Image: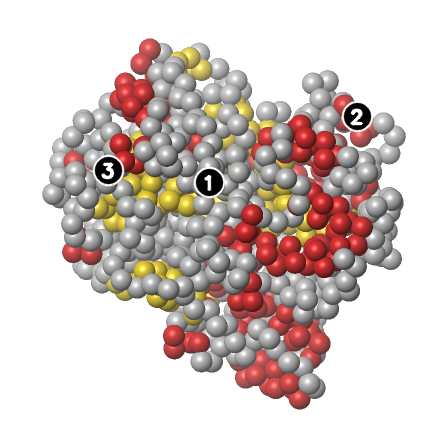
Amino acid sequence: MGWSRSGPIFAGIFGLAASIALQGALISQPSAPDPEPQLDDPIPPSISGPFISDPDVLARLDQASPDGDCRNSGPLAFACLIQARVPGDEAGSAGGAGSNPFNLPVAAAILKTINDDLNSFQTSNGIDPAQQLNPGFLTHPASRIELVGIVNRIDRQFIDDIVPGAEDHNRCGEISLIYRFAYSLNEGAVASRLPVTMNIVFPAVPRSRPRGAADCSGVAKRWVREMDRPAGRSVDRIVADLTDRKDGVVSILDGRDIERLELNMQAYRIKAGADQTDFGSTAEYVIRVFRWDPNRDLFLPSFLTNEIDRARILGDSDGDGNSCEQGTRRPGLKQRFVAFLNDPAVLSDIDTGTLNIPQEFLACRARSVSPGGAHRSRNALLWNAGAPGEQIITNAQIERAMANARSARRQFSFMRSPDDFRLRFNEQSCSGCHQARGIAGFHFPGSDRAGTPVSNAVFLPGSPHFYGDQARRRIILRRLAQGDQLSRYDLASGYASRPLNRFRPELTNTQLLGGWGGACLLPEALSSSQRQWTCQADLKCVALFASSNARGLGTCVPAQGTRIGDAMQIGTVSSSRFGLDRYQRTDPRPLGNWADRANRNTLIPDDRLPSNPPADNSYYAAHQEYYQGNDSSSDLRVKRDALTGGFPSGMLRLSECRGLPSEATCGLVASSGFNACLDEVAANRKTLAQCFAQKTSYAGMRACDSSNPCRDDYICLRPMGYDQANGRRQFEARQKAVSYDPSDFGQKEPDPAWLARNRGRGDQRGICIPPYFVFQFRSDGHPPPVARQMTVAAGGQAGQR
């Protein structure tokens, strides 16, 4: 086709790569080839580290006994761990190991807090309940918590937060067990994870100080041994090694040692068609910490490390919904906090990323917003506000504090300017870190388990920030295992936005440090900053989002030409007050009246597309802002653009999976009628699998793996699983289920060259897509958590019985 803007329709919903059951025929996954990263081992040694992410291993450790008895369940079953402090025999029977943990007595305050938070957004922010997580999932018997990762954070040994009952315990960092909330309705006809994580945090050194793990060096040695074990072990062998009493890293985890539970939940999501900010969608997150209260046998809301209480510091001594003990007056905090920031030792800790803010200044709830990362004021606790009433500390005050610290012989390794200071501070907070190079507000969403339709399956368990930080964590772990005493500089953390430059040798041959899609500083900002964030060869730094909230911050993009996955638009972010941000496109220049949202044209002009597309193919530029268009048109070129939007900074793709360049792979993405199909799912008249099968189209998308991540505000979705042996069979099976005109966009059979990649085993890299187009990363759109039966009629139609 010669027409250049071709592609399937997006409607602020999710676009997906799919390998699913079509018309009852199960499409198999290909065997895992080498040497390229594959589905069963997508993490190369250069960025591996002290973490466990294999979903099969984690499922075994998290397995609930059929009889629901904790004594016969996996050692890391969530419901059992959080009941370990319950007196008597209640821990082994209260609801059972596989029960919904929010129904357990120990979690009563957690459930109440979540419900209160959801309600508060409705009353104070005008959020429609349909845009939120349905609170019925929290107590539904078919809801569950799934273990998705075990992460060693022994590098966080500078954290000295108060732990009731363990004030004198040796601080040697932490071990985190990360869980995702999930549900299954209608006998599995509709099942998904939800945008909710729960992190159980243990002290790295158990309080019982068992032999071989009685101190920091002993625990570090256990993790080094596990990290150095050979690849290719069976699941049985890995589980046995992890749980071995002599040196297993899991065997020393005891629920009675739990220091806190950390909740990260998408509070609401506004889809592109209703989003007034022009970011293409808006999602806000709530982060909570719960600590054990031995007097009430409950996990109660508590303060968050380094998350300051802006309301109280700025003069509202009663606090707001983020405050601890809201209504309890705490006057005079701003003067004390600014004095705290002027302490030379504190400035040194801000510089090295080893800050530990005193509890009196901290909040008990964090809020963050996506997309836009550091350019959103909500994610910057030390926001450089224009109005004095919203300014905690001025640039002049920061400059004086840094000058005084230098006079006291403090040297800064990572800060030179107020902008350096603010970014370094903000990224050490919960709200700042969770939106920097994250995945829809998460840094470890976990890979999905076997049996999850790949159309709703995460390929990579961690974010680009997570993988970029592993080199630093490995070095710290090995030094501690050798018995070294580490200084604050030795423990210096990387930026959430980008790894430290000193780890460049370890990150060679990856895109994690100044590579495609990575964070950089514009050339004019380098001279005044300690952050020498440049791009790799053949890339240049461009401000896709320009704002005063993150001055000079850009993204590494190709220096010449445009490639698949590249951004297609540039804009500015303005903040009228804290938390109120708007996006305005500046290039391509907006035409017409953009205030008329129903009739404006937000499409990327054809002249911005590359010339000379591959044979039998055409380019398409997805855009960020919503476009209404006409989805009833008989002209396929008009229809495919209707109800589109939601791609942060836009994205170039190809309409078909033919003649794909090396940076691209083939995916199935949502097309005409997908929104309507989702409505049928919510009404229990169709299944998700039917929508994935019937309302998707092929497209050439940016490929991704752990060394080559997507741009910010995108996710790496699991590949389809097509290869040279099964490609024709999968295409023919799909043809039987899809009712589109074969001349429509995205209906051509993927070409033999793509299927022949990787020695005929197919391209097993993931596919870059906006995370809110993926069902499990949206709080909205899920069917109500009520028990209903469904019938599936001939031809794949479903109805209620």
Label 3: few (<14), some or many (≥20) within 10 Å?
many
Q: Nearer the viewer, mark 2 or mark 1?
A: 1
Give the left or right position of residue 562, taking residue 129 as reference: left
- Separation (CA) of disc 3 from disc 2: 54 Å
The percent position of residue 384, horizontal first and vertical second, equals 50, 73
> Callout 3: helix, strand or loop?
loop
Mark 2 or mark 1: name the one nearer the start of the chain: 1
- State whether residue 503 is above or below residue 633: below
Q: Are marks 3 and 2 in contact (CB under 8 Å)?
A: no
Question: Residue visible at 33% across and 40% down?
Answer: 665
Q: Is residue 354 visible?
A: no
Label 1 sits on what residue type?
Pro
Question: Residue visible at 67% across and 33% down?
Answer: 238
The percent position of residue 669, horizontal first and vertical second, equals 33, 36
Question: Residue visible at 75% across and 34% down?
Answer: 243
The percent position of residue 13, horizontal first and vertical second, equals 36, 39
Viewport quadrant of the C terminus: top left
> Callout 1: helix, strand or loop?
loop
- State whether residue 579 is above or below residue 388: above
Viewport quadrant of the N terminus: top left
Label 2 sits on what residue type?
Arg
Mark linked to residue 35: 1
Mark linked to residue 658: 3
Label 2: few (<14), some or many (≥20) within 10 Å?
some
Residue named by callout 2: 71
Q: Is residue 350 visible?
A: yes
Give the left or right position of residue 743, taking residue 315 as reference: left
